[in-house]
Amino acid sequence: MKYNFDKIIDRKNTNSIKYDFAERRGKPADILPLWVADMDFAAPDGVIAELKSKAEHGIFGYSEPDDKYYEALCGWFKNRHGWDCDKNYFVQTCGVVHAICSLVRALTEEGDGVIICQPVYYPFASAVTDNGRKLVVSELKNSDGFYTVDFVDFEKKIADNKVKLFILCSPHNPAGRVWTKEELKRLGDICLKHGVFVISDEIHCDFTYGGNKHIVFPTVDKKFEKICAVCTAPSKTFNLAGLHTANIYIADKTARNKLVAELNKQGYSQPNITGLVACRAAYEQGGEWLDRLQDYLTGNLNFVREYLAENLPQIKLCEPQGTYLVWLDCRAAGMDDKTLSDALIKAGLWLDDGFIFGVGGSGFERINIACPRATLRLAMEKFKKAFN
């Protein structure tokens, strides 16, 4: 095989937050960690080769993205997602979460309302509350594991709380939804009507299943381009999170300048040179690798689905349309959140507990399936043990 995703790579003693810091986080040292969203696969060979070349050059001075960087970046989104993006509208940050926090500070004042749809990626809530803004929550509707936006509640919460900002998770983490054009259009129209700016976190955009297609938010309607920031990064797609590089697209000049001003206040200017090298190489050379990875992840998803059906039919898989994070409904087991978490830890498995994702997350667990099949098989055996 040209790409051997079955290969188990020992990540211990590599300063891995996933494998080396369990005890510091109150977990047993030998626990199997499938919680944090990085993959157990090596990056594409082309990325590694370009990083080696930069290392051999030996100078790691201040750097900025050049025309070839933007050609690779814009080419990727054009070819993969049909998005004609203007390179002049991008701002680099050291990560998507960093960008979201910076945008919250740049585009709102303390006490302003910021709305999110929970259950959702938990740093969204902290990005709001840690910066002194008012957290407003519109709960997603869960219909037998399929999540949708409660548009009536969403608009009412915006109007009642004078919301200034909406943080959209697209594709959705942890529910795995790939939002349709119609859903995004309705969200955008509501935000446009009420003067709400949209931060669209699209970091998982390259992972979809079953014919579902990710739609970049501003491509839905030209009017939306002026009210949004699209947060992109190669980190999830190519397992490059530790290189701290994100590309934030803001067409509106005023909003873009406010973000830049906020970054200046933080003392952040030139991005990480290794991140720039890896990002360009990934977008230039990583397409075939990603295609084969998606095939492998589909196999992993099938494995989890079949394992649950055969061994734990009371645990329901919320069928993901995107991401490599699987949302498991464990409510039928009849455990409270602490009992469920303790049972998993005792069985030797570390997942993300659902309640940390906010309203609607209690009784759920999130598992990262971006690992070799043998690792996933061991994880599911431990998962079964927790309920036995």
Image (cartoon, grey):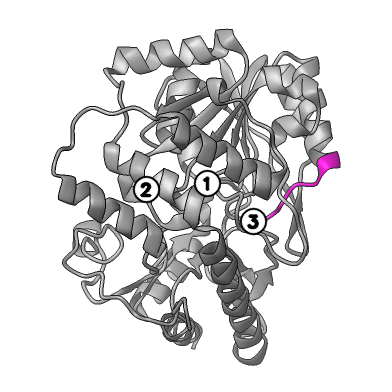
Q: Position of residue 110 (x, y in %)?
A: 47, 12
Total marks shown come to 3
Nearer the N terminus, badge 1 or badge 2?
A: 1
Cβ–Cβ under 8 Å for marks 3 and 2: no
CA gap, disc 1 to disc 3?
Answer: 10 Å
Taking the image as shown, residue 265 lies to the left or right of residue 90, namely left
Q: Position of residue 270 (x, y in %)?
A: 30, 25
Q: Which residue is mark 2?
A: 278
Q: Position of residue 75 (x, y in %)?
A: 59, 41
Q: Which residue is mark 1?
A: 121
Q: Position of residue 253 (x, y in %)?
A: 58, 10
Q: Judge whether residue 33 can be spotted in this image.
A: yes
Q: Residues within 10 Å of mark 3 (few under 14, many from 20)?
A: many
Q: Judge whether residue 37 can be spotted in this image.
A: no
- Image quarter for residue 348? bottom left
Query: What's the residue type where badge 3 is placed?
Result: Ala
Query: What's the residue type where badge 1 is placed?
Result: Tyr
Q: Name the residue furthest bottom.
A: 310
Q: Nearer the viewer, residue 136 or 11?
A: 11
- Image quarter for residue 310? bottom right
Nearer the N terminus, badge 1 or badge 3?
A: 1
Q: Which residue is mark 3?
A: 175
